[in-house]
Amino acid sequence: MANQEDNLFKNVIAHAKEYGFIFPSSEIYDGLSAVYDYGQNGAELKNNIKEYWWKFMTMLHENIVGIDAAIFMHPTTWKASGHVDAFNDPMIDNKDSKKRYRADQLIEGYIEKLEEKIEKEVEKAAKRFENFDRAMFVSTNVRVLENQKKIDEINEKLKDAMGSGNMEALKQLIIDLEIADPISGSRNWTDVRQFNLMFSTEMGSLADDTNKIYLRPETAQGIFVNFLNVQKTGRMKIPFGIAQIGKAFRNEIVARQFIFRMREFEQMEMQFFVKPGEEMQWYEFWKEKRMKWHNALGLGEANYRFHDHLNLAHYANAACDIQFNFPMGFRELEGIHSRTDFDLKNHEKYSGKKLQYFDPEDNQNYIPYVVETSIGLDRMFLAVLSKSYQEEKLADGSERVVLRIPAPLAPNKVAILPLTKKDGLPEKAMEIMNELKFHVRCFYEEKDAIGKRYRRQDAIGTPYCVTIDHQTLQDNTVTIRHRDTMEQERVAIDSLKTTLTEACSINNILKRI
């Protein structure tokens, strides 16, 4: 099963490059580790995902507005946020393979294997017993109980070590669990060291510490420092939110798994400011809303799950992930956090500026609490791409690769295809193209047989193909071919604009939420 998933992931990565979605950055110079460029189709898909998120946040919620903060910020920002002192990952090297890992992720990988053993035991029992009671089985099976107890013990030790910053305890846990390097199989580890993830640079003509600034490791702080600017100029009342899409940068110890973990990435974040004491109800509200947003895409509800954080960040009193079933298994797609008043309180302390909200209903000033929703745009891109990718065997014995991307997100909505390059068909096709291109994104192609062109459009994820043939010149009708079913229907040219704009509108998805 693991090999099948690995092969699928490799096929998705190869497909992404072959069809203009993602290229290794600076490839002509042998690339740059964990940095990627989005190609012509990738840029369109990425922009469509942004639009889907942005419209959901700022159009469907009258109390959420958007901003676009700068990447460079005053360096004290990151002192106040805790990133200068606490934005570290525990790093460990294997002396034999010379590979570097995050110590906590090695331990979490060990836990995942134990969880997989539990699931296999459950699956075996489910096949053996007709009236299978999972809860009863888990509570009575000796092997399952032993593994679950071990998982709980490891999680507790991991939580204590990470919370106290005890690097020696982390290494000892790796030794006790006999965790080996996945590449060499060696257990010859270095000590665990803290590694700050921020990229630094200098502003101005002098390269010294006084001019040191950072590439932002998250977009949230740009929202927090503009809290009062937005609240006052927008006359916003609590509760209200500020949304932002932007680049962030982290010098990851281990950046891998294609675009899942990169050093330059893009976030879609919303900070929702609420009255202290009401944060937990809003935390639950946004958990439900965000899951509905994901499920509305139709990628399969079984591919999503909530995962509560065992080790809370220093600023949070509640946190969970929406995990997605990527080709490499369930991984974090979006984080939902109750950040308390940590950020605004610290920025008030370090800046000396008052960052409070006057509540006219209670006639008092207070620092709002914050509920955050934060989704990685690149991870969302990978989720859509990987779940849309399908290799199919057709009834006639042929095969095709198709990207079943939801139509509103597809890079091109319709391909305009004249059947031949003569008899006035290209001219008629361009006439239709020039009408439609103001309403939906179109792609024109006249090279190769129509069957080959259909297959190329399937591979790109184009939901509709419009074929112009000799009958078109006689009765002003065309053939629409549907990507997912490959069914074809004859329609009047006059109805194309209405049919295609309606089928490809992002509003169709938003209405399901």
Image (cartoon, rainbow, N blue to C red):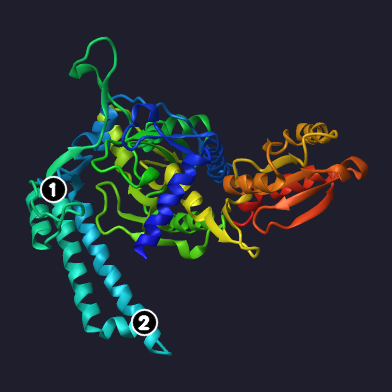
- The amino acid beneath tag 1 is Gly
Is residue 53 or residue 338 the one in the foreground?
53
Screen quadrant of the C terminus: bottom right
* Most foreground residue, 489 or 270: 489
Say whether residue 167 is left or right of residue 224.
left
Check the picture and name the quadrant holding the N terminus: bottom left
Is residue 54 or residue 414 the one in the foreground? 414
Would you say residue 267 is visible in this rendering?
Answer: yes
Q: Residue 399's image quarter?
A: bottom right
Q: Confirm whether residue 408 shows in the render.
A: no
Could you say where residue 249 lies in the image, as x and y percent from the top left?
A: 33, 34
* Helix, strand or loop for disc 2: helix
- Residue shown at 30%/33% (left/top)? 347
Decide if residue 207 is on the left or right side of residue 509.
Answer: left
Residue 258 lies left or right of residue 455; in this view the side is left
Q: Residue at x 18, y 36 (%)?
A: 85
Q: Which residue is mark 2?
A: 134
Q: Which residue is rendered at x = 27% and y = 32% of the image?
A: 78
Q: Total marks drawn?
A: 2
Of the numbered discs 1 and 2, the one sitting upstream in the chain is 2
For label 1, the residue is 165
* Residue 190 in picture, x, y percent from top left: 8, 46
Percent position (x, y) of residue 333? Answer: 41, 51
